[in-house]
Amino acid sequence: MNRLNILVIEDNSALVANLFDYFESFGHIMDAAPDGLTGLHLATNNQYDAIILDIMLPGMGGIEVCNRLRNEFKCKIPILLLTAKGTLRDKLEGFDTGADDYVVKPVELPELQRRIYALVKRNSNAQVGTNIQAYQGLTLDMDTLEITRDEQKIQLNPICRKILEILIVNAPNVVTKQKLETEIWGDSPPDQDILRTHIYSLRKAIDKPFSTPLLKTVQRTGYRLSKDD
């Protein structure tokens, strides 16, 4: 298996240390969050191959984290729930919310490793879909989440990808800042500096390497994709 980027969302520091020691011995890159909100932030702002997610977390629980990743952010990273909750009801709730696998603690690390490998392989072998949004050479495959511009692949974190999805579906029309914030964060948007930061990252990814900018700021209104000034 190639080197993987794995996010562990778990509040048990001893378990996190064991997971890091084991997976890093195989050359994988590990990242960790001690609570659900931090885990959600990391998962939506970085690129991971798999997520190991506890259910019983401080603040935002693992079920809510999984549900928001799947439904709000359309995140397709494989998610393995690793938890002490082992009833059939717990397992069904986990799968219903979008988890790809469910493992009850304690688990032998070689088994956990094989399960992660199987999820990553299954995800990478997923059939390429045909649900593609495109504008002026910029394309977003809604099934595989692959983004390209003039056939060059572009990597975006989930929030930037969601912004791009909204803009490309509405292109070349203007999308207001309020609409973007509502679509991404619901009724509790952060301050506007956060949206501006993500717009900066999106512009850097889809425009900077190319001669013609597409992402335009409409002063005091919002943003749009347009080939014209």
Image (tube, rainbow, N blue to C red):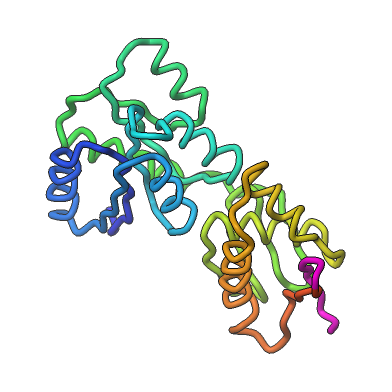
Q: Is the stretch drawn in magenta largely helix, strand or loop?
A: loop
- 72 drawn magenta: no
User: Could you tell me how many numbered marks the image carries?
Assistant: 0
Above or below, 160 relative to 106: below
- Residue at 20% x, 36% y is 12
Above or below, 32 relative to 167: above
Q: Position of residue 180 (x, y in %)?
A: 71, 55
The residue closer to the viewer here, 221 or 157, is 221
The residue closer to the viewer here, 215 or 92, is 215
Q: Residue furthest front?
A: 191
Q: Position of residue 199 (x, y in %)?
A: 63, 69
Relative horizontal placement of residue 123, taking residue 194 as reference (left or right): left
Relative horizontal placement of residue 50, taking residue 154 as reference (left or right): left
The residue closer to the viewer here, 120 or 19, is 19
Please report the bounds of the magenta region as a residue range: 220-229
- 223 drawn magenta: yes
